[in-house]
Amino acid sequence: MQKASLIWNYMVPKAPLLIGTTVSHYTSGPPKPSWSYKFNIIMALVKAFAGHMDDHPLKQTQAMSQLSDKYAPVHSGANASESIVPNNYRDKAATYVETLLQDQGIDSTKLGWDWKNDPRAEKALKGEWTETKIKDDKFAEGRTVLYLHGGGYFLCSIRTHRWATWSMARLGGAKVFAVDYRLAPDSPFPAAIHDALAAYLYLLDPPTDSGITPVDPKNLIIMGDSAGGGLTFATMLAIRDAGLPMPAGIIGWSPWIDLLYSMPSILVNVLTDYLPSEGFTHGGQSSLKKVAKVVLKAVGTEEEAMPSTLPALQHYTNNNLLHCKYVSPVLEDNLEGTCPILIIAGDAEMLRDESIVFAEKHVNASTSIQLRLYDDMPHVFQMFSFLPSAKHSLIESGDFIRKVTVGGPGVSNTKSFERINVQGERRPLEADAVPEWKERIGKLGGGPKFLAKL
């Protein structure tokens, strides 16, 4: 009854939006040619919900997200069980995180908080195992996925992403361990990466009395969507830099790896995505158009603005740390010693270009990188399971998991950058898909030259 009331209270005020979207769909056509009426309506509603986040206090938005946990059932074909990562794994991970931060010249003063004494770290780090009830020939004992959920680093949980963990358990033939890492702004960077590393160490060497078999890192995939995808890339870099055994591979679905908003798709694709156009902080202070006014007023069009002089862009960390590779992994220059990478993004999403730039930036790296860009698709389109492109990309992800883990054929250290249309047909990514990216990368909004055009 409560769920029905919530839906009713949300849907009734949206009547003008639904009518307007319907009229526009049948007169002017949908925002993208392949969008059905059903999908167009869904996108309009999701976009409206995301846009309304600025109208409510952050704590209220987080409470609404937590409420949705109650209505996230375990798939009928899956078994799910809770697991607790003992806090001594956080202690082990903290020694690595401290060294990594020191190597980056980052201390508690620069972080803006005492991450080693976070009271929220005293609470148990919860995880959830998901596996299929009926194991077919895709399943291999020991094959494991560590899943890091999305949500801008301040929303969602392992329960909101059960659709993803179930899909990868089934199609990847694996057991999936999703972890409820701490969320910003109460526990900002590096809390999430601290918890992700703790979970990784736990899987490699669980307590003897846990009933969990240690996972061979060659049989372990780390993956995530959106912010969880960015955290996946950051965790891979942290594992490499800490000298820990590398996983078999990583997968990022629409990974958020550029928190500086440096690429053009963040604005070009506003009308075809549901992410908030005013940025990811409440009140819209991180809107590029608002930031541009501050930057250009302060320094003009020739100089780069000091991030400390600007409004906070993200909940995840302060502006001074947006250039850190563990915050914005697109800034990493060297992939030596990392593992095979699969990146899947939508061509219509606001975060599209950072995935393309990451792949193109490392075209000569020894690491295998596969980029799959799906025509007309928005951010994390895999959640819209009725879409052919969603089904195709889920299968692609499952195939990658089985290829790079023990017993699979593996992947060569070549690069494969492809576009995939709604029929599943492939074509090579064109050269220079993101013009002037070398001039933009690492600069807020791409730098004053591009901000001046807003």
Image (cartoon, grey):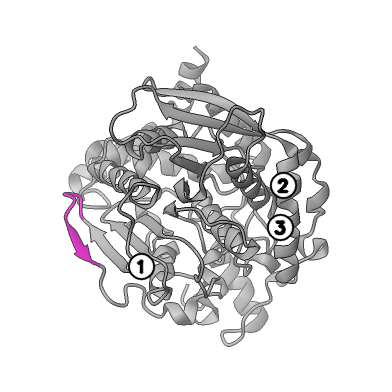
Picture quarter containing residue 88?
top right
Label of residue 96 in the image: 3
Residue to which mark 1 is pinned: 413
Give, as a single range, the part of the protein colored magenta. Answer: 421-428
Which is more foreground, mark 3 or mark 2? 3
Relative placement, left or right, of 398 versus 203 is left
Q: Nearer the viewer, residue 193 or 351?
A: 193
Position of residue 248 measured from the top left corner of the image (x, y, whole percent): 45, 53
> Is disc 3 in contact with disc 1, using a CB cutoff of under 8 Å?
no
Can residue 278 be seen? no
Amino acid type shown at disc 3: Tyr
First in residue order: circle 1 vs circle 2: 2
First along the sequence among labels 3 and 2? 3
Three-letter amino acid code at disc 2? Ser
Q: Earlier in the sequence, mark 3 or mark 1?
A: 3
Q: Is residue 133 visible?
A: yes
The residue at the point 44 percent across, 65 percent down is 354
Q: Secondary structure at mark 3?
A: helix
Q: Residue at x 51, y 46 (%)?
A: 216
Are the two marked residues, 1 and 2, in contact with CB atoms closer than 8 angstroms? no
- Classify residue 216 as left or right of residue 352: right
Q: Residue at x 32, y 43 (%)?
A: 394
Judge left or right: residue 121 versus residue 449: right
Q: Position of residue 370 (x, y in %)?
A: 34, 61
Q: Position of residue 138 (x, y in %)?
A: 30, 36
Residue 9: image location, x then y, percent: 49, 24
Q: CA distance from mark 1 to mark 2?
A: 37 Å
Q: Which residue is mark 2?
A: 187
Residue 310 found in image quarter? bottom right
> Against 17, is 263 above or below?
below
Task: Decide whether residue 108 is among the magenta residues.
Answer: no
Question: Which is nearer the eye, 10 or 429?
Answer: 429
